[in-house]
Amino acid sequence: MTTSLRSIRPAAVADSLEEMEFRTLADFDNGQLGVFWSEGGGTSPWEMHPDCDELLQILEGAIDVEILPLAGGPGERVEVREGGMFVVPRGCWHRQTMLARTKELYLTPGRTLHSTDDDPRD
């Protein structure tokens, strides 16, 4: 068996990127492990992963994650700060607001759907 083993420093990779340039660090199942950075203040479009949970880890900075519950109703918000992790449940539409300059590692082992609707559940 041939493998190419390597150690990855996600924060260092993020330092080499342009703002909002997403870099895949490794393929993972049917998705990827990646990293990006962004200045504070921006809110992402909605996204949803129909096949998997998604792991978010804040390497630097802070985000506010808004989750739309599967059963309907108003969104719920969770603040995740530097060093923290958050698991987005499978099938839940979510978006994030950067509260400060943020470097983020994400693990999304499946497909990603996007929406710019006010409520993508409709």
Image (spheres, rainbow, N blue to C red):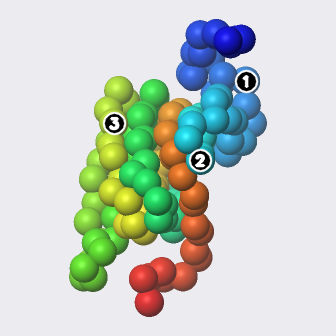
Q: Quadrant of residue 113?
A: bottom right
Residue 100 as seen in the image, left or right of residue 114: left
Tag 2–tag 3 contact (CB < 8 Å): no
Amino acid identity at mark 1 = Ser
Return the disc, 1 or 3, that comes first in the chain's sequence. Answer: 1
Q: Secondary structure at mark 1?
A: loop
Q: Name the residue tied to disc 1.
A: 16
Mark 1 or 2, which is nearer the eye? 2
Q: Which mark is residue 67?
A: none
Q: Looking at this view, is 91 or 1 the one in front?
A: 1
Return the disc, 2 or 3, that comes first in the chain's sequence. Answer: 2
State the separation of the CA atoms marked 1 and 2.
26 Å
Amino acid identity at mark 3 = Met
**Percent coordinates x, y for residue 115 in the rendering:** 57, 74
Report the quarter where the C terminus lies.
bottom left
Q: Secondary structure at mark 3?
A: strand
Report the quarter where the N terminus lies.
top right
Q: Secondary structure at mark 2?
A: loop
Mark 1 or 3, which is nearer the eye? 3
Amino acid identity at mark 2 = Asn
Observer able to see residue 33: yes
Callout 1 crowding tier (Cα within 10 Å): few <14, some 14–19, many ≥20: few
Q: Name the residue tied to disc 2.
A: 30
Give the farthest residue toward the front.
Answer: 1
Q: Looking at this view, is 6 or 76 the one in front?
A: 6
Which residue does the image show at 46% across and 28% down from the upper left?
Answer: 60
Which residue does the image show at 42% across and 83% down from the upper left?
Answer: 121
Q: Which mark is residue 85?
A: 3
Tag 1–tag 3 contact (CB < 8 Å): no
